[in-house]
Image (cartoon, rainbow, N blue to C red):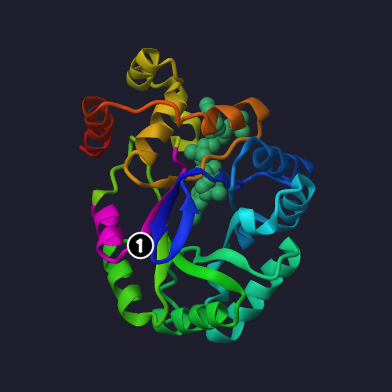
Amino acid sequence: MHVVEGNGARIPVIGLGTWELRGRTCARIVEQALRLGYRHIDTAQIYDNEREVGEGLRASGIKRNDVFVTTKVWTTHFMAKDLERSAKESLARLRLTEVDLLLLHWPNPHVPLAETLGALARVKQAGLARHIGLSNFDVAQIEEAVAACSEPLACDQVEYHPYLGQADVIEACARHGMAFVAYSPIAKGRVKGDRALARIGDRYRKTAAQICLRWLVQQNVSAIPRTSKLERLQENIDIFDFELSDEDMREITAMGSAAAR
Ligand code: NDP
């Protein structure tokens, strides 16, 4: 699996998103994804499925070190006294001794960022997370976080797809050696009915969703599409046998600017 580098972290370019996946479905999809070749699973404390993600990991039989597991601390645990405990609770639910990446899920203006980042850095130093990072931070917040954190930040995980441009955040991540991870990478399924993406897909014999995901990974961005359907697990990872032309890349990128107008 290709990876995106972020200050020492090697994040597989395609991961499985697990928001809204619950119970048996969640465990089964995680297991199947790993069997199909996914090596990156994205969960969060607030998704209420860390237990089932852990079950899926164990059921897959894939070695722990071969899978990149991301979870996120919710904003109500951003005070120094709460963050480490919260991280340990996530690990207990996952039944892991460490995660590969622990993210601050969303900026919380009510807790000083330096306090939260100090606690996050200590979680890394204690060996509970191999890498730490951000989610939903804008450019100014990235700058503030980088200046305040004693440990390198591996990434910012942000919504990004053809209908939402993120050039400024991508640029800020690159400036600081951070990876950019795209969430809702197929616009919550919206790309399926997109005629322009389908037309491009006809030329490569790929679906609109595959064209969209390929457009992301060709920008050196990691993408974490979610599906509850086995056939779509395969579809969403079957994007490494073709390359979009520069012209097609530009056409898809222009959709984001058009949507913003
Ligand atoms: P996605 O863009 O991944 O879209 C998921 C939707 O698309 C589902 O309804 C799924 O339906 C459908 N779908 C999946 N594959 C295909 C396909 N090949 N063709 C057509 N439809 C498809 O949305 P998410 O918002 O879930 O984002 C992905 C992940 O990002 C989340 O699961 C979560 O892990 C993370 N995330 C992080 C956030 C943050 O704040 N950091 C916020 C939001 C998401 P079906 O199940 O029927 O296949």
Residue occupying image coordinates x 52% and y 40%: 225
Q: Residues within 10 Å of mark 1 (few under 14, many from 20)?
A: many
Residue 183 in magenta? yes
Q: Quadrant of residue 117?
A: bottom left
Please give left or right for residue 180 compared with residue 19 in the image. Answer: left
Q: Left or right: where does residue 219 sit relative to residue 59?
A: left
Q: Is residue 177 above or below residue 236?
A: below
Q: Is residue 94 above or below residue 57?
A: below
Q: Which residues are magenta?
A: 168-185
Amino acid carrying label 1: it is Met
- Residue at image coords 46%, 27%: 209
Which residue carries the number 1 mark?
178
Vertical order, 171 against 150 (above or below): above
Residue 161 visible, this orientation = no
Residue at the image point whose x is 39% and y is 40% from the top: 217
User: Residue 228: image x %, image y %?
Assistant: 65, 35
Relative to 151, is 131 above or below?
Answer: above
113 or 118: nearer the eye?
Answer: 118
Q: Is residue 122 left or right of residue 96?
A: left
Residue 145 quadrant:
bottom left
- Residue 202: say if magenta: no
User: Where's residue 210, x and y in %?
Assistant: 45, 27
Determine which quarter of the picture holds residue 43: bottom right
Q: Quadrant of the C terminus?
A: top left
Front-lying residue, 170 or 193: 170
